[in-house]
Structures are given as structure tokens and as C-alpha cells.
Image (cartoon, rainbow, N blue to C red):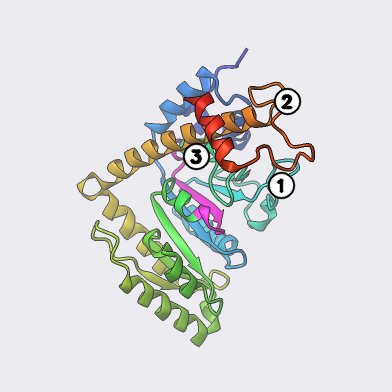
Amino acid sequence: MVREFPSLDDLRAGGKRVLSRVLSRLETDWGTPELAVFLDHAAVSASAHVLGLTGPPGVGKSTLIDALIRAFRQRGERVCVLAIDPSSRFTGGALLGDRTRFQTDPDDMDVFVRSMAARDRLGGLSDHAMAAIAVLRAVCDRVIVESVGIGQSESDLAQAADTVVLCIQPGSGDSLQFMKAGVMELPDVVAVTKSDMGPVARRAAADVAGALSLFRGRDDGWKVPVCELSAKDGHNIDALLENLQRHADFLLEDDRLSTQRLSQQDHWFQDMVRVAYGQVGLSLVLSSEGPFAGRLKPDNRRPFTTFHEASNLLSSRLG
């Protein structure tokens, strides 16, 4: 029997322990009607601004998040951080799920940090992570989602956050890679970290600004700003905060925020169905008692003679 979920008011007042238990139940109670009703209510009760940070490992996202947490807490805001980490292929758990990366005060009841594994998404956001974001933005003032930038995460993050910050490290050659990969269409703000590196940081900012000038894909009228900052010494954090607020205000104009979130919910639904049916197909193929039993090769290395044969058999089975 599934226990009743707390109300959002009780969740807001319940502290870290209650919130942590509810997030754990997103996985244990997944697929139950009770959880579905709870998530529906949370999804339409969003009150927080969701900030997504992405970028390659080592770019300084954790240090930047520390600086943002301090800034938001100085304003009296309740801050929740969701760190999406790569998954262990053996346990499914978060490989980098070490909350000591963030220098937060454990006694501060208005700062909550949670690590979640990407599960079957290479650097992307799982269904459980999307559900966690929906819950956190209903009970907090600020939600920060940190994702390791290894391909899928950037596009997934754009479907979960209100404002996406792309972090670039000076001297890494990232700006050229982003220009080739077309990632410039995703961020709302670009942060060039480690500005204390001087000319190298200025060169990176100029390269990124050039890449942005070549991109003509956005049609919402927002011009993506580029901030040079150093989270370690606090340099230019205020400029980043100002640009984040500018984008938040921009989203409130002409009901852009509501339109964006409705589009995100549609994306969540389609992606959840796509993944679920893909898992059903995989289970049918791998099952020793299913419709494809006996199709495995003796060495168990490839289930069918050709991919074409596998596709035809799946199509006939799944309609």
C-alpha cells in the first residue's frame, strides 16, 4: 500500500528530511497513481525560478553554485540544488554524487542539495530528475540544476530549466567545439569562468561572442550575454546575477514563461513515453521466455543475424 504524499504546504514547512524522503519516493513509488496525482499538483504549482548550469567537467560549476547559493541566501531565498551526475554501470547510482563539492552550511535549513544519477541517459536528465525538478520548484524560491556537459545534458537541461547558463573554461578550446556542435542555440547566458586568468579569459569571451553572432536560430528576441567571472574570488558574480534577473524578467513578458513551461511539460510527456516503450522493446528482445526467445546467437554477443531482421521482428510484435 502506497503511503499518502504530504501536501505542498507541509513539504515547504517540513525541512530537509521530509523533502529528501519525498524525492526518494519518486523512484520507489514510480508509476503509482498516488505519485502521478502528487506530481500533477506540483507541476502546476511552480513558484521557483529554475536555473540550469552546464559545461564540461572542471569548468568550475560547483564553485559557481557555491557563490550563487550565498548570493541567493543573502536575499533570504530558499535554495535547492539538484546535481545530475553520470551513473555507475553496476549500481545505477551517481558516480560523482559527493555533496561535499558544495561548501554549504549543514545547519541552514533553507539550503537543500541532492545528487541524482542520470540513469540511462548519457549526461542527460532521467524521468526521475524531471519529476524532482517539478517538486523542488513548487516548494523553493530558487532551484539550481547542475548537469555534466557531455552531449545530451545541454539539450535536456533546456527542457527543464527556465534559464540555462553555459559555463566555458578559458584556454580549453570549448568555444570552437560549441560553434561546431551548434550548442549556441541552447544557453540564455554564457559564463566564462576563471576570469583571473586574464588575457586567456578575455580571448575565450571574445570567441564565444563571435560564435553567438554567427548563430541566427533564436526568434524570441533575447540576446545572449557573455559574462567573464571568477567564482573563487567573487569577481563579476553581480553581473551574472543581473543577467539572470534580466532573463527572468524577459520570460515574464508576453507570458513567455508559461508558454515555455507548457512546452517543457509536453516534451517531458513525449520523452517519457518514448523511453518507456523503448525499455519494453529491449526487455522483449532480452527475455529468455519472450517472443524472441531462441533468437540469441550461441556466443550471446548479438541477438539477431542482422539489425534489419531485429527491426522487422520488433515492428511485427509492437505493431
Label 2 and label 3: CA atoms lie apart by 33 Å
| Residue with the mark numbered 1 | 88
Label 1 and label 3: CA atoms lie apart by 19 Å
Residue at x 46%, y 21% (from the top left corner): 37
Q: Is residue 215 left or right of residue 109?
A: left
Which badge, 1 or 2, comes first in the chain's sequence? 1
Q: Nearer the viewer, residue 312 or 286?
A: 312
Q: Is residue 77 magenta?
A: no
Mark 1: which amino acid? Ser
**Mark whose residue sits in front, 1 or 3:** 1
Q: Is residue 303 left or right of residue 195?
A: right
Against 156, residue 18 (above or below) is above
Q: Position of residue 30 (x, y in %)?
A: 57, 26
> Dot 2, crowdedness within 10 Å: few (<14), some or many (≥20)?
few
Q: Which residues are magenta?
A: 137-153
Residue at x 72%, y 27% (from the top left corner): 294
Q: Nearer the viewer, residue 21 or 296?
A: 296
Figure quadrant of residue 231: bottom right
| Residue with the mark numbered 2 | 288
